[in-house]
Image (spheres, rainbow, N blue to C red):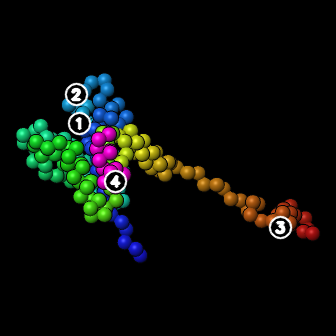
Amino acid sequence: MGRQRKKLLIVDGYNVLRSGIRYRRIEDPDYTDDAFNVARERLINDVVNYAGNDWRAIIVFDGGRNAFSTGETETVGGVRIMFSPAGQSADKVIEKLAHDARERQVETLVVTSDATIQDTVFGNGCDRMSADGFSREVGMYYEDARLDEAPKTARKNTLAERVSPEVLAKLKALRDGERPR
């Protein structure tokens, strides 16, 4: 059995929250901390489910303007979550992660709608997906999962459907007390 190729999913956290249709709706009609936290939780859960066992995943949030941000990661459901360190943008962290992964020959997909990041990572040989593209993919993932769990009715197979017409005629004759031909 051949070795499976390594795959890495990198998500531009705040960009996807602002640009992805799936997350913008949560923030409507008000942009409170609670709504933003709900959107962030939803993104994390979506990445956990989307990545599954196929991808290693990292969500990078911008912490560059936070003097206390160290760039440490936390793992939730197998997905690494990090805030960029103080003084460094999430964009630079994402570009570095993507570059390093490609140097190690890891198939890499970056989810962002930031055109500059998309151009940079694509130039390094990484794939990219927009925030709305990711929203659609996740929506399709959940729809497929829902359909897989929907109750299915079994088709009733009767004996009459499985035997030849000649045998069926003989069985009916026996049932009705007639002598089979």
- Residue marked by disc 2: 32
Q: Is residue 119 magenta?
A: yes
- Badge 4 or badge 1: first in the primary sequence: 1
In this rendering, position of residue 144 left or right of residue 106:
right
Q: How many marks?
A: 4
Q: Quadrant of residue 117?
A: top left
Q: Residue at x 37, y 68 (%)?
A: 4
Boundaries of the magenta span: 115-127
Question: Is the residue under label 4 in contact with that under label 2 (CB below 8 Å)?
Answer: no
Tell me which amino acid carries mark 3: Val
x and y, in percent, of residue 48 in the image: 31, 51
In this rendering, position of residue 175 left or right of residue 80:
right
- Residue marked by disc 3: 167
In this rendering, the label closer to the viewer, 4 or 1: 4
Residue 126 circle label: 4
Question: Taking the image as drawn, is residue 144 in sight?
Answer: yes
- Residue marked by disc 1: 37
Q: CA distance from mark 4 to mark 1?
A: 30 Å
